[in-house]
Amino acid sequence: MILDKLLALALFIITPLICIFITRLFNLERFGLKFPDLTLPFYMVEMLLLSGHFFAHTCLSYYSMLLALLAIVLRFLLLRRTPTRFSYRRFFKVFWRSSFLLSSMIYLILVIAIFFQ
């Protein structure tokens, strides 16, 4: 059981490192992809698997509600900044990158909750 907890903590550190390596190896920055763009889907899958393994229910519903609230807040912030011009490309870029930050925080909270379980 302690090995599973250490694996959860290791995945939090190893996943971004692997994505940084892949981004630099294949030179994905020329396409505008950075390591948070690759790390986000991995964090989503890891959160789903870890919460399903350690807890009775997965945190998928809470996570999707937080992403929906993030989208609403970002929409209002972008519209307040430029009310006449709304760019979907800018919205999705900001949403994807801020989703990475939100996912990192939730993943860290999940790992802490796993260790205190």
Image (cartoon, helix red, strand yellow):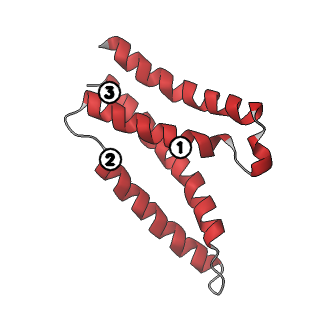
Q: How many residues crowd around disc 2 within 10 Å: few (fewer than 14), some, or many (20 or more)? A: some
Q: Position of residue 11 (x, y in %)?
A: 49, 25
Q: In this view, does 10 lie to the left or right of 113?
A: right
Q: Along the polypeptide, which appears first: circle 2 or circle 1?
A: 1
User: Marks 2 and 1, Cα distance to the nearest angstrom?
Assistant: 14 Å
Q: In which quarter of the image is the C terminus?
A: top left
Give the residue displayed 22% in from the left and 39% down from the top: 57
4 up-or-down from 66: above or below: above
Q: Quadrant of the N terminus?
A: top left
Q: Along the polypeptide, which appears first: circle 2 or circle 3?
A: 2
Q: How many residues crowd around disc 3 within 10 Å: few (fewer than 14), some, or many (20 or more)? A: some
Q: Which residue lies furthest to the left in this view?
A: 56
* Label ID, residue 114: 3
Q: Where is residue 4 in the image (x, y as percent from the top left)?
A: 35, 17
- Of residue 9 and residue 52, the one placed in the foreground of this image is 52
Give the residue displayed 32% in from the left and 47% down from the top: 60
Q: Where is residue 101 in the image (x, y as percent from the top left)?
A: 54, 47
Can you identify the residue that label 2 sits on? 60
Can you identify the residue that label 1 sits on? 40
- Number of labels in the image equals 3
Q: Is residue 43 left or right of residue 63?
A: right
Q: How many residues crowd around disc 1 within 10 Å: few (fewer than 14), some, or many (20 or more)? A: many
The amino acid beneath tag 3 is Ile
